[in-house]
Image (cartoon, rainbow, N blue to C red):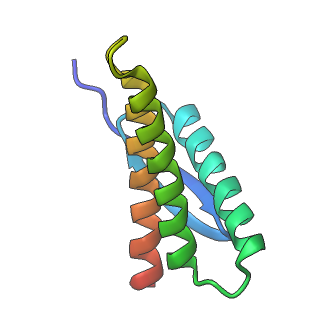
Protein backbone atom coordinates (compact mmCIF):
# COMPACT_ATOMS: atom_id res chain seq x y z
CA UNK A 1 0.00 0.00 0.00
CA UNK A 2 1.42 3.38 -1.03
CA UNK A 3 1.42 6.28 1.36
CA UNK A 4 0.50 9.63 -0.05
CA UNK A 5 2.92 12.49 0.51
CA UNK A 6 2.22 14.80 3.43
CA UNK A 7 1.46 18.42 2.60
CA UNK A 8 2.39 20.69 5.51
CA UNK A 9 2.40 24.48 5.83
CA UNK A 10 5.41 25.83 7.72
CA UNK A 11 6.94 29.25 8.36
CA UNK A 12 10.65 29.89 7.88
CA UNK A 13 12.15 33.38 8.20
CA UNK A 14 8.69 34.95 8.28
CA UNK A 15 7.75 33.28 4.96
CA UNK A 16 5.07 30.61 4.55
CA UNK A 17 5.91 27.43 2.65
CA UNK A 18 3.92 24.36 1.76
CA UNK A 19 6.18 21.35 2.04
CA UNK A 20 5.34 18.12 0.26
CA UNK A 21 7.17 15.20 1.82
CA UNK A 22 7.16 11.45 2.21
CA UNK A 23 7.65 11.67 5.96
CA UNK A 24 5.06 12.35 8.64
CA UNK A 25 3.82 15.87 9.30
CA UNK A 26 5.34 16.04 12.78
CA UNK A 27 8.82 15.40 11.39
CA UNK A 28 8.39 17.99 8.65
CA UNK A 29 7.29 20.61 11.20
CA UNK A 30 10.21 19.70 13.49
CA UNK A 31 12.72 20.00 10.66
CA UNK A 32 11.23 23.30 9.50
CA UNK A 33 11.41 24.65 13.06
CA UNK A 34 15.07 23.65 13.28
CA UNK A 35 15.84 25.32 9.94
CA UNK A 36 13.97 28.45 11.02
CA UNK A 37 15.92 28.64 14.29
CA UNK A 38 19.25 28.18 12.52
CA UNK A 39 18.38 30.75 9.87
CA UNK A 40 17.29 33.29 12.51
CA UNK A 41 20.58 32.80 14.37
CA UNK A 42 22.49 33.54 11.17
CA UNK A 43 20.21 36.46 10.34
CA UNK A 44 20.87 38.00 13.75
CA UNK A 45 24.61 37.87 13.16
CA UNK A 46 24.32 39.01 9.52
CA UNK A 47 21.39 41.46 9.51
CA UNK A 48 22.06 42.83 6.02
CA UNK A 49 22.30 39.41 4.33
CA UNK A 50 19.54 38.33 1.94
CA UNK A 51 17.28 35.42 2.78
CA UNK A 52 18.93 33.45 -0.01
CA UNK A 53 22.38 34.01 1.48
CA UNK A 54 21.09 33.07 4.95
CA UNK A 55 19.54 29.86 3.56
CA UNK A 56 22.76 28.90 1.76
CA UNK A 57 24.89 29.54 4.84
CA UNK A 58 22.45 27.49 6.91
CA UNK A 59 22.64 24.63 4.39
CA UNK A 60 26.44 24.78 4.48
CA UNK A 61 26.45 24.66 8.28
CA UNK A 62 24.12 21.65 8.34
CA UNK A 63 26.10 19.91 5.58
CA UNK A 64 29.31 20.52 7.57
CA UNK A 65 27.72 18.90 10.62
CA UNK A 66 26.73 15.88 8.52
CA UNK A 67 30.23 15.67 7.08
CA UNK A 68 31.77 15.77 10.56
CA UNK A 69 29.34 13.09 11.78
CA UNK A 70 30.27 10.87 8.83
CA UNK A 71 33.97 11.33 9.58
CA UNK A 72 33.41 10.35 13.21
CA UNK A 73 31.66 7.18 12.11
CA UNK A 74 34.30 6.29 9.50
CA UNK A 75 36.03 3.08 10.39
CA UNK A 76 33.55 2.13 13.10
CA UNK A 77 29.93 1.79 12.13
CA UNK A 78 28.23 2.71 8.89
CA UNK A 79 26.90 6.27 8.95
CA UNK A 80 23.56 6.80 10.60
CA UNK A 81 20.90 6.72 7.86
CA UNK A 82 18.52 8.71 10.09
CA UNK A 83 20.97 11.62 10.30
CA UNK A 84 21.50 11.52 6.54
CA UNK A 85 17.76 11.41 5.89
CA UNK A 86 17.05 14.34 8.21
CA UNK A 87 19.88 16.36 6.66
CA UNK A 88 18.54 15.69 3.16
CA UNK A 89 15.11 16.82 4.30
CA UNK A 90 16.54 20.01 5.80
CA UNK A 91 18.43 20.75 2.60
CA UNK A 92 15.25 20.09 0.63
CA UNK A 93 13.38 22.59 2.81
CA UNK A 94 16.15 25.12 2.27
CA UNK A 95 16.00 24.58 -1.49
CA UNK A 96 12.28 25.31 -1.36
CA UNK A 97 13.10 28.53 0.50
CA UNK A 98 15.76 29.53 -2.00
CA UNK A 99 13.44 28.89 -4.94
CA UNK A 100 10.74 30.91 -3.15
CA UNK A 101 13.27 33.70 -2.58
CA UNK A 102 14.30 33.74 -6.25
CA UNK A 103 10.80 33.36 -7.70
CA UNK A 104 8.42 35.18 -5.33
- The percent position of residue 23, horizontal first and vertical second, equals 41, 32
Visible residue check, residue 23: no
User: Who's the residue at 35% across and 36% down the image?
Assistant: 22
User: Who's the residue at 22% across and 17% down the image?
Assistant: 1
Q: Quadrant of residue 11?
A: bottom right
Q: Looking at the rendering, in which quadrant would you find the C terminus?
A: bottom left
Q: Quadrant of residue 9?
A: bottom right
| Of residues 13 and 26, the one drawn nearer to the viewer in this rendering | 13
The outermost residue toward the top is 77
46 with respect to 77 (left or right): right
The outermost residue toward the right is 44
User: Who's the residue at 62% across and 39% down the image?
Assistant: 30
| Of residues 39 and 16, the one drawn nearer to the viewer in this rendering | 39
**66 above or below 46?**
above
| Of residues 64 and 75, the one drawn nearer to the viewer in this rendering | 75
| Of residues 25 and 54, the one drawn nearer to the viewer in this rendering | 54
The outermost residue toward the left is 1
The outermost residue toward the bottom is 48
48 with respect to 29 (left or right): right
**14 above or below 31?**
below
User: Who's the residue at 68% across and 66% down the image?
Assistant: 42
- The percent position of residue 67, horizontal first and vertical second, equals 41, 40
**99 above or below 59?**
below
29 with respect to 96 (left or right): right
- The percent position of residue 35, horizontal first and vertical second, equals 60, 53
Visible residue check, residue 21: yes
- The percent position of residue 73, horizontal first and vertical second, equals 41, 21
Count the marks.
Answer: 0
Amino acid sequence: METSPSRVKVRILEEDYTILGETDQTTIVEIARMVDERCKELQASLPSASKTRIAILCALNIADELHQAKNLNEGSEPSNPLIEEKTKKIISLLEEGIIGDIYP
